[in-house]
Image (cartoon, coloured by chain):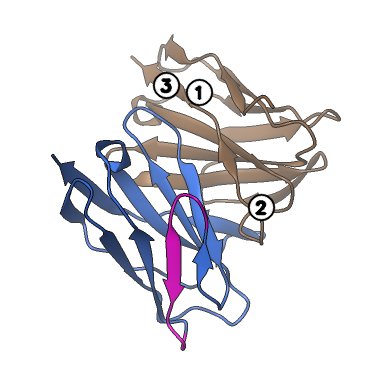
Chain colours: A brown, B blue
Amino acid sequence: KAGVTQTPRYLIKTRGQQVTLSCSPISGHRSVSWYQQTPGQGLQFLFEYFSETQRNKGNFPGRFSGRQFSNSRSEMNVSTLELGDSALYLCASSLELTGLSTEAFFGQGTRLTVV
Amino acid sequence: DAKTTQPNSMESNEEEPVHLPCNHSTISGTDYIHWYRQLPSQGPEYVIHGLTSNVNNRMASLAIAEDRKSSTLILHRATLRDAAVYYCILRVRSNSGYALNFGKGTSLLVTP
């Protein structure tokens, strides 16, 4: 079956712009989580959506937001981009909520560069 | 919140077994122990998870201490393709629920 698909794979944006990243989970999975990965901070949890509702949220400013559609596809939006937002953004899908008994499947990520 | 401690790096010879340790002394009774790995330029990949008993799958084995304060991921025969960062993960409480706390992980180098 198809894995987790993230689009686009690479993106270059200018400071102050906004960006939207997309994640299509594995069919039947209702949970989608988003992570930011940077060399300095490692993998950090952004938020999780389950059945169209945000269930968990990490310690990121309000410029980072997301949503989930009825088909479980999810989008993440970052407004007023800063240089420090340059990172690999990963999404993961799972049958149940993160960290319970089921495994999470990660996409290849979207590499965002802010200039 | 439960936290994990792993060595920054380990090295192994190809076709030798590898034991990757993880300490999680503050684990709660209901927390699953998850292991993921991340190969260069890829997203993390699930390896194994367990609660109390030792677990085996086609990729690895997970040995969990009786008091659950530590665990060991065992790769029975390391290959060059096993070179990756290995993360031992517990759930941690975030602002409004739970999240997987990846930490820094152990960078495994496999030499021929």
Which numbered dot is residue B26? Answer: none
The x and y percentages for residue A97 are 70, 53
Q: What range of the chain is rendered magenta?
A: B57-67
Measured in 3D between alpha carbons, the distance from the residue under mark 3 to the one under mark 2, in whole angstroms, is 23 Å
Q: Amino acid at mark 1?
A: Thr
Which residue has dot 2 on it?
A56
Measured in 3D between alpha carbons, the distance from the residue under mark 1 to the one under mark 2, in whole angstroms, is 23 Å
Upstream in the sequence, badge 3 or badge 1? 1
The x and y percentages for residue A44 are 45, 47
Q: Residue at x 40, y 81 (%)?
A: B25
Same chain check for tags 3 and 2: yes
Nearer the observer, disc 3 or disc 1?
3
Which residue has dot 3 on it?
A111
Decide if residue A14 is in sight here.
yes
For residue A30, side relative to residue B51 (left or right)? right
Depth check: B6 or B72 in front?
B72
